[in-house]
Amino acid sequence: MSFKVAAFHFAVITFGLLFGAVDAAEARTIQLVGLGDSLMAGYQLPPGDGFPAKLEAALKAKGLDVAVADAGVSGDTTSGGLSRVDWSVTDGTDGVILELGANDALRGIPPEQTEKNLETMIGQLKQRKIPVLLVGMLAPPNMGADYAEKFNPIYKRLADKYQLALYPFFLDGVATHADLQLSDGMHPNPKGVDVMVERILPAIVTFVGMIDAGAK
């Protein structure tokens, strides 16, 4: 084999390896973690009908290579989430969907404490350079107007302060529709989860795009 031919073969092989490496990098699966409570965990729903699984399926249907891990714990408050954020959000996580606070409101936990816990979690994730999509909740009507006035603005205030992506209300389109809820009138049924995924999907797609752009 002549020197020129050998050099050409080497160049072709090198280009192929580099091109393959770029393809592999571009094909990397984006790892999201849904850190939340029973609304994230799929309370009383069959496997595959919970929010993380249906969100992942919806993202894949759009051609996005994204895995959504379920780190939801039924009954969890923001204090519970804070106590487990380090091990629930494993190394290699590309982004967190932070959905906590509903149980704080149901238990009448002071909104100031809820905000402090969420802020601490956000700070810890930012230190690890993990982007956060903050998912808001609204206080239930039975807690009264004074409580709602203090609780409801928490999420936007934190999103503005830390320049986070924000989805204002996780149960948008479901909270007032009995046909989309379980018999407890609080948790979504499978059809309710479908509505939640449909409503939040544009925000998640944007969030994934931001993560993907930051990784390049």
Image: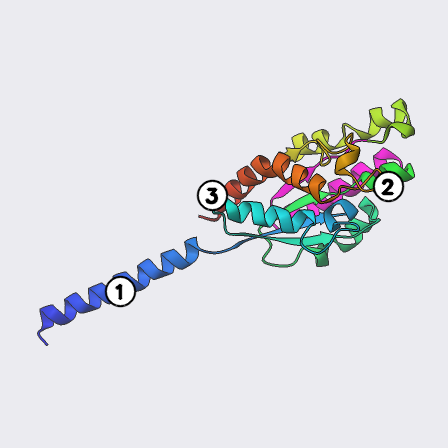
Compared with 63, 201 (above or below) is above
Compared with 111, 1 (above or below) is below
Q: Of label 1 and label 2, which has the lower sequence position?
A: 1
Q: 157 left or right of 186?
A: left
Identify which residue is drawn at 76% across, 42% down: 100
Kindly tell me whether residue 127 is visible in this rendering. Answer: no
Circle 2 residue: 184
Q: Tag 2: residue type? A: Asp
- Foreground residue among 70 and 197: 197
| C-alpha span from label 3 to label 2 | 41 Å
Compared with 1, 131 (above or below) is above
Q: Of label 3 and label 2, which has the lower sequence position?
A: 2
For residue 213, the mark is 3
Depth check, mark 1 against mark 2: the one in front is 2
Q: Residues within 10 Å of mark 1 (few under 14, many from 20)?
A: few
Q: Tag 1: residue type? A: Thr
Q: Position of residue 76 (x, y in %)?
A: 82, 49
Circle 1 residue: 14
Q: SS at mark 2?
A: loop
Residue 146 lies in quadrant: top right
Q: SS at mark 1?
A: helix
For residue 90, the mark is none
| C-alpha span from label 1 to label 2 | 62 Å
Q: Position of residue 8 (x, y in %)?
A: 15, 66
Boundaries of the magenta span? 109-138
